[in-house]
Image: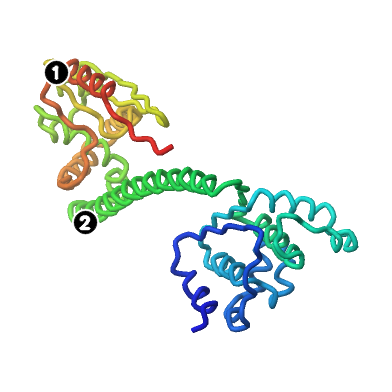
């Protein structure tokens, strides 16, 4: 294959394309290298596509960049600051062909190639997206800028990957829960109020899960009791709901701790609002008939939580010692920041 054809074929396999625009235009692309381009789509990709009007004058470097545009490959474009300055002069005078014809741009090696270099800059800088062009004076400027941009990209990718992992787990957990609930509810429920019970099984599943995580109580008896919310906490030996505020560089999170009478505690694995929602659900749950509550309780207590993250977790240690240790480890922690 001709080297120009090989260059074009290689571009789609690239992760990024780094373009350095300098004083030389480079070699005009062969006719075969122009094959396979969707020039109509490329024309719509920029607000200034006039460079595409003379396809046979495009350089092989320009075609490589256009192939990257077609394949949505990120382009990091750098232009020699002298060329960038002359491009501004060109833009001011290009509508007067007589003046442009007489200007000898000092940054451009060959006078006849100036238009094709400057119009290519216009094409890139007026793209719908990924249209940043950065002037440089030394190659070190390019290196520094790439390090900065790629470190930010790496940081974003790490963050997005973490979020995707969490969301995927939540989705799997939700799907499994729905499947389990459907199977358990349909197998357990019968009677004229089946629809009401099925609706309650979905509405109160978080409440039943919360109660099932409590130690030192009979879960079924507690769910079928007429206790108020305060009495329910007292039955579970919970004497205080303590909130700890955690601040980070980019986040602030509140964690709830349910403190028992012996200063051991449950730690909320979700949010503080979760506890408030459970309290509201309990008040609504008490309004259901005894038969409905019994059916919902028996159905949901049979919904296994194995392998799933519990909403609260019991710690058999002193709450004050635990929080002091957390504060100490936080002050000694090492943060990795990609700046």
- The colour scheme used to paint the residues is rainbow
* Place of residue 24 in the rendered image (x, y in percent of width and height, measured from the top left): 65, 63
Q: Residue at x 16, y 17 (%)?
A: 321
Q: Position of residue 309 (x, y in %)?
A: 22, 41
Q: Which residue is depicted at the point 47% across and 43% down?
A: 148
Q: Residues within 10 Å of mark 2 (few under 14, many from 20)?
A: few
Residue 223 in the image, given as x and y percentages of width and height: 19, 33
Task: Answer yes or no: is residue 321 visible.
Answer: yes
Q: Is residue 215 above or below residue 319?
A: below
Disc 2 element: helix
- Residue 234 visible in rendering: no
**Which residue: 53% across, 79% down?**
5
Q: Nearer the viewer, residue 300 or 118?
A: 118
Which residue is painted at 85% across and 63% down in the image? Answer: 101
Q: Quadrant of the C terminus?
A: top left
**Relative side of 240 to 74, left or right:** left
Horizontally, is 82 left or right of 95 in the view? Answer: left
Q: How far apart are labels 2 and 1 at the CA level?
A: 41 Å
Q: Is residue 109 left or right of residue 143?
A: right
Q: Which residue is mark 1?
A: 318
Image location of residue 89, percent across then percent down: 79, 51
Q: Is residue 161 above or below residue 311?
A: below
**Tag in front: 2 or 1:** 1
| Nearest to the observer: residue 162 or residue 118 | 118
Which of the two discs, 2 and 1, labels the residue nearer the N terminus? 2
Task: Say above or below: 276 vs 306.
Answer: above
307 w.r.t. 321: above or below: below
Instruction: Please tell me how crowded label 1 is: few (under 14), some (14-19), or many (20+) other residues with Cα within 10 Å.
Output: some
- The front one of 320 and 199 is 320
- Residue 237 occupies which quadrant of the picture? top left
Q: Tell me, for residue 183, which label it has, or none.
A: 2
Q: Are marks 2 and 1 in contact (CB under 8 Å)?
A: no
């Amino acid at each position: 294959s001709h080297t120009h054809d090989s260059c074009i074929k290689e571009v789609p396999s690239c992760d990024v394309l780094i373009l350095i625009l300098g004083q030389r235009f480079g070699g005009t692309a062969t006719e075969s290298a122009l094959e396979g381009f969707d020039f109509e789509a490329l024309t719509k990709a920029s607000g200034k596509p006039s460079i595409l009007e003379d396809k046979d004058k495009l350089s092989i470097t320009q075609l490589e960049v256009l192939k990257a545009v077609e394949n949505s490959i990120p382009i990091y474009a750098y232009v020699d600051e002298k060329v960038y300055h002359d491009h501004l002069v060109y833009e001011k005078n290009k509508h007067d062909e007589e003046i442009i014809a007489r200007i000898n741009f000092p940054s451009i090696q060959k006078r006849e190639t100036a238009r094709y270099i400057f119009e290519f800059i216009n094409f890139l800088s007026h793209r719908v997206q990924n249209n940043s062009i950065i002037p440089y004076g030394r190659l070190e400027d390019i290196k520094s800028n790439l390090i900065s941009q790629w470190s930010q990209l790496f940081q974003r990718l790490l963050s997005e990957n973490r979020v995707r992992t969490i969301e995927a787990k939540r989705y799997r957990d939700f799907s499994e829960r729905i499947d389990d609930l459907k199977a358990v509810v349909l197998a357990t429920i019968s009677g004229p109020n089946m629809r009401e019970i099925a609706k309650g099984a979905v509405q109160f599943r978080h409440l039943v899960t919360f109660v099932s995580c409590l130690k030192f109580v009979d879960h079924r008896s507690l769910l079928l009791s007429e206790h108020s919310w305060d009495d329910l906490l007292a039955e579970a030996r919970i004497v205080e709901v303590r909130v700890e505020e955690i601040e980070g560089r980019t986040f602030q999170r509140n964690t709830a701790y349910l403190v028992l009478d012996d200063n051991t505690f449950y730690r909320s694995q979700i949010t503080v609002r979760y506890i408030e929602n459970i309290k509201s659900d309990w008040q609504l749950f008490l309004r259901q008939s005894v038969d409905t509550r019994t059916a919902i309780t028996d159905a949901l207590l049979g919904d296994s939580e194995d392998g799933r993250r519990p909403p609260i977790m019991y710690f058999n240690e002193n709450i004050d010692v635990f929080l002091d240790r957390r504060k100490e480890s936080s002050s000694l922690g090492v943060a990795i920041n990609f700046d």
